[in-house]
Image (cartoon, coloured by chain):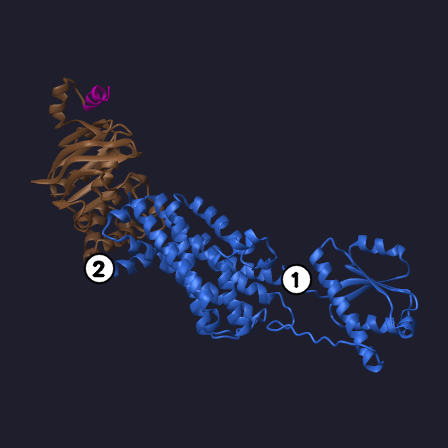
Chain colours: A blue, B brown
Amino acid sequence: MKELVNFIKKEFKHILRDTRTLVILFGIPIIQILLFGYVITTDIKDAGIAILDLSKDQTTQDITSKLISSGYFVIHKNLNSYDEIEAVFKQGEVKEVIVFEENFGKKLIATNSANVQLIADATDANTANIIVMYTSGVILDYVNSLNKTIDAPFKVDINERMLYNEELKSSFMFVPGIMAMILMLISAMMTSISIAREKELGTMEILLVSPLKPIQIIIGKVAPYLLLSLINAISILLIGYFIFGVPINGSLVLLMSETMLFILLALSLGILISTVAKTQQFAMMASMFALMLPTMLLSGFVYPVENMPVWLQVICHLMPPKYFITIVKGIMLKGTGLFFIWKETLILVVFTLFFIGMSVKKFKIRLE
Amino acid sequence: MKIITVKNLVKKFGDFIANDNLNFEVEKGEVFGFLGANGAGKTTAIRILTGLSKPTSGEIKVAGFDIYKQTEQIKRNIGYMSQKFSLYEDLTVFENIRFYASVYGLSKNEIKQKSENLLVKLEMTTYRNSLIKSLPLGWRQKLAFSIAIFHNPKIVFLDEPTGGVDPITRRMFWELIYDAANQGITVFVTTHYMDEAEYCNRVSIMDKGKIAALDTPENLKSLFNVKNMDEVFVKIAR
C-alpha cells in the first residue's frame, strides 16, 4: 500500500512538472466547451432576411412586424421587384427572402387563401431548413390568430411544446456530448501516453523486475487521471450550468456516480491501448482516431443515430459514449432516476469489465 | 555457493530458437560476464533470469529460488539496470532514489540515511535536488547503478550498462561494480566491449543461441592461444 501511495505521488509530479500535459488536461476542455458553446450553435438568432412585399397592406405589415418581434430575424432590406432577389442572396447578407403576392390581404379575406413564398439560401442546408420552419411558424401563428375572429369552417389548433428543452437550445445537446468526448479523450489518451512513456524510457522494465505487481503499476498510473478527469467533469458541469444555463434536474449524486463509471471505462480503454502502444506517439494517434472521432460522429452527439444507415447504426450501438450521453441527458434534462437508465448503466458496466479483463490479459501476454 | 543455476534452458519464439539448451552456474560474489554478438541470445537469457520473460523449458534457480514458482522472492532479491539507465528525467536525484527505494519497501529513515551516504560516495551531494535531465550521461549511469543495488540485492543484472559512455567513465563505472562485488553482491553483466570482459571473474560467450565458451578470461586466452579477449571472441564467432 505504501508503495502504491509513493507511486501515485511520483505520477502527480510527472503531471505537474510537464506544462504540455497540464495544458492538455485543463486548457483543452475549457477551450472546447467554450468553442462548442459559442461557435457551433444551431440556434437561429437575428438571421438576416429581405422582404418583397407586392401588396403592402395591413396584413403583410402585421406579419412583418410579427417576424421582427420574434427575435429570430432582422430585416436587412425591403425589395421592390423579383429581379433584386438573386442579387441580394449573392451579397450574402440575407438568408431568406419572403415574397407576399399582390393583394395579399384582400385575397385572404375574399377567398380565404393567399400566397406567400419563402426563398432560402440553401448553401447551408440546415440553417435554411430551420429558418423556413421558423418563418412558417410565425405566419401560421398569425393566420390562426385571425381565425379566432373570423369563423372558419374547419380549424385545428396545434399546441407545440418542446419538452425538456423548451427553447431548443443547442447547449442542452452539446454539454453532455462534450463531457463524454473530453472524459474519453483525457482519461484514455493521457493514461495510454503516460504508460507508453515509461516503456519508451525503459523505466517500465525496471518496474516489472521490481516487487511491484502489475496491478499496482496500473492502479498507480491510472489513479491520478481518475481524480483529474473528475475535476474536468465538474468544471464542464459548472460552465454548462452557469454560462450556458443547462439545468441539472436529476440527482447530482447519481450524475457523479455515472460520470465516475464512464471515467473508469475510459481509463480501462487507455490501459488497453497502452498494452499495444510502444511509443507515446502511437498511443496518442490511436486514442485520437479510435476514441475521439467515433465519440464525435457515432455517439449521437452531433448527428442523430436514427438517420444513419442500418450497418452504421449497429456500429453506433457499440460506442460506449452513446450510452453515457443518453444517461447524462436523462439525468440533467429530464431528471430521470436510475430506474429509467439502468439498462444503459449496465451496458457501461459490462463494457468496463470487458476492457479491464482484456487489459489484464494483454498485460500478462506482454510479459512473455 | 551457487547463486544462479541454469539447466537445459530453452527459449523458442515460434520456430526461432533464441536460447538453445543453456547450462551454466554463477558463484556467489563473482562478476560474471555474459558476452555475445547482437542477436546471440544474451538479452533473451537475461530477461528470463530477471522474470521479464518465461522460458519454454528448463530448470532455473535465481538466488536459490525457482523461477516458475517463487517469482516474488526472486524479485525482492535482485536488482536490474538496463542500457537506458532508466531514471525519471523530470524527477530530481533524491526523488528517483526515494521512489525506487520505496518500491522495494525500504522505510523512510532507511532511505534518508542511505541516500545521504550514497550521495557523499558519488560526490553528488550538491546535486541532490537537481533534475536528472540536467546531469551528464556518466553521472546518470552511476546513479542508475547505485539505485539498482540500493536495496542490497543478492544479484544485480546489468544489461549493457556501459553503452554510449566514454572510456574514462566506463573505467570509473567498473570500479563501482567491483565495489558492489566486494560487498558480496553477485554481478551478472552483459556487454559487447571485449576489454570489459577482462574485468570479469568468468565469462560466457554466446553464439547463435548456444554457450560457445565459459571460463576465466586467462583460461580462455590460453585455450585459444591468443593475447586478448577480442581475439577469443573473433575465433568463436567465426
Establish whether labels 2 and 1 are both on one chain.
Answer: no
Q: Is residue A53 left or right of residue B139?
A: right
| Between B27 and A182, the one nearer to me in the picture | A182
Q: Numbered disc 1: what chain?
A: A
Q: Circle 1 sits on which residue?
A: A42
Q: Which mark is residue B220?
A: none
Residue bounds of the magenta highlight:
B229-238
Give SS at disc 2: helix
Of all residues shown, which one is farthest toward the front?
A: A153
Which mark, residue B108?
A: 2
Q: Considering the image in quadrants, where does the N terminus of chain B appear?
A: top left
User: Which residue is at 26% across, 29% downward?
Assistant: B40
Identify residue type, mark 2.
Lys
Chain on which label 2 sits: B
Residue A100 within the magenta-colored segment of the rendering: no
Q: Residue at x 37, y 47 (%)?
A: A275
